[in-house]
Image (cartoon, rainbow, N blue to C red):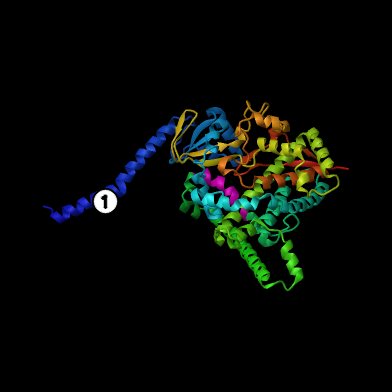
Amino acid sequence: MYSVTEVLVALLIVILVWILLVSPLQQWYSKHSRFCHLMSELPGPKIVPLFGNTYEFVENPLNKFTELLTHMIKTHGPIFRMWVGPFTCTVHVSSWRYAESIFNSSVHIDKSSLYSFLHSWLGTGLLTSTGAKWHLRRKLLTPAFHRSVLDSFQEVFSDKSDTLIKILEVERKKSESFDIAPFIWQCSLDIICETAMGTKMNIQESVSKNDTAYLKAISYAAESGLYRLLRPWLHPQLLFDISPRGRKYKKSVEIMHSFTNKVIQERKKEYLDSKRMEVNGFTDENEKFRIKKRRMAFIDVLIETTLGDGEEEKHHLTDEGIREEVDTFMFEGHDTTASGISWTIYLLGRHPDIQEEVAREINEVFGQESIKSTQKLSELRLLDRCIHESLRLYPSVPVIARELNKEVKLGGHTLPAGTELFIHMFYMHRDKELFPEPEKFNPDNFLPEACEKRPPYAFVPFSAGPRNCIGQKFAMQEAKTVVASIVKNYRIESIESPQELVLLMEMILRSQNGIKVRLHPRN
């Protein structure tokens, strides 16, 4: 016979097991089974146990990713599901009709949980944060992209573009044809270092050993995102951390954080020193002039916001918070813009008639002047349309992902809260109903009268809605300056046809073999 105490203890254990284990498992199963049922209603490829639908992507090199994704969209339509391993199912849409209700919503603004892969690098800055923190950061960072701030950056855009032209001239004399993309990437990174961190790294001319390590770390961390996404066994943080890729990724993050932290401390010291000198009176007129003339970088705006004087309420950012935003801007602000510039150069090089029209427009507006006037830059309307058309055909960010916060119906299908939704702009921008001859480079697609006829979310290279890209004006201003500088000095001849290109749909859209061109000096 069992004693009363033993029976009570056993009963207590059963109750605890039920509360802590069985009940949550039942709830999870009930929720998961409904989720699985709703996902099964969607079209999609055949599921392989454990791998889901990623086995094709894993067994093929990354340069086959675009080809496989294109095949899935053609086979299963503009909305389909894809299992990433046994527990995560993603839904993919490639039509503005499905994306419209997401972009137009103030509810579905959370980035996919897969962006958490970037947390160890970017923290929870503007790109990866959610909820109240995202709203606060968005409000906090908006002044950093005011027109007056962008105007002050124009001199940097112009000077770095002039340096690019000198370097391209050297390369042109060495090789009849060459890949122009790395030179554009270096120019864009040069620009972002000075505008974001106030640091002149002169990347296009020469870089120090420490600078080189930082640049390599950015590249490695960025390309690791897609690699990890397509390998479900690397999704758990612990398994990724102990993997060879994870260990190298961690070292890359440490290098980047160390670099950014150093710059933050230097810029904070400069800021506080200048404030003390203002209070105590300047003893050196040269120093007074230097401080007054110094251009504010993105990092200075953040420091001013958290430390500056004024009656408005201050939102105090820690050094970690400043680093999150600077690292985010460094990542998002150079690769995306370099991609957009490279593709515009490629398309102009494929269409000499349009290129010559652009060259005439640039000469009429600027003549022999350097491209340092933002007012005159705004008059390059054909170039503006060319860049937009380039972003239609080759969007810098080909896909974005959101996590649905509420259940939603898309195309007759019910998507429950928590669904990971991928919106493929690369395919959305090729809608035959909205863009006749969708594969053709036609800047007239962006004449005002053509834009007015299209739905508002048919063209979204900078995302759309409340969570659109805060830096899109910065990107367009930089792109117009760099492209105008190149076209002003050279006639571009692109070598490869669109059919010969191998597109890499990583976090940024790029060509596997770069953008090969011949440059012919203009008289």
In percent of width and height, residue 149 lies at: 69, 53
Inspect the magenta stretch and tell me whether residue 233 lies in it.
no
In percent of width and height, residue 373 lies at: 78, 48
> Along the line of sight, which residue is nearer the eye, 28 or 468?
468
> Along the line of sight, which residue is nearer the eye, 5 or 447?
447
The single residue placed furthest to the right in the displayed view is: 523
Drawn side of residue 472 relative to residue 363, left or right: left
Q: Quadrant of residue 427?
A: top right
Residue drawn at 76 percent across, 69 percent down: 286
In percent of width and height, residue 132 lies at: 49, 50
**Range covered by the magenta-colored residues:** 217-231
Is residue 239 visible to the viewer in this orientation of the structure?
A: yes
Drawn side of residue 223 relative to residue 367, left or right: left
- For mark 1, give the secondary structure: helix
Inspect the magenta stretch and tell me whether residue 218 lies in it.
yes
Residue drawn at 43 percent across, 31 percent down: 40
In percent of width and height, residue 338 lies at: 69, 46
Q: Which residue is mark 1?
A: 16
The amino acid marked with disc number 1 is Leu
Residue drawn at 57 percent across, 59 percent down: 254
Magenta part mainly helix, strand or loop? Answer: helix
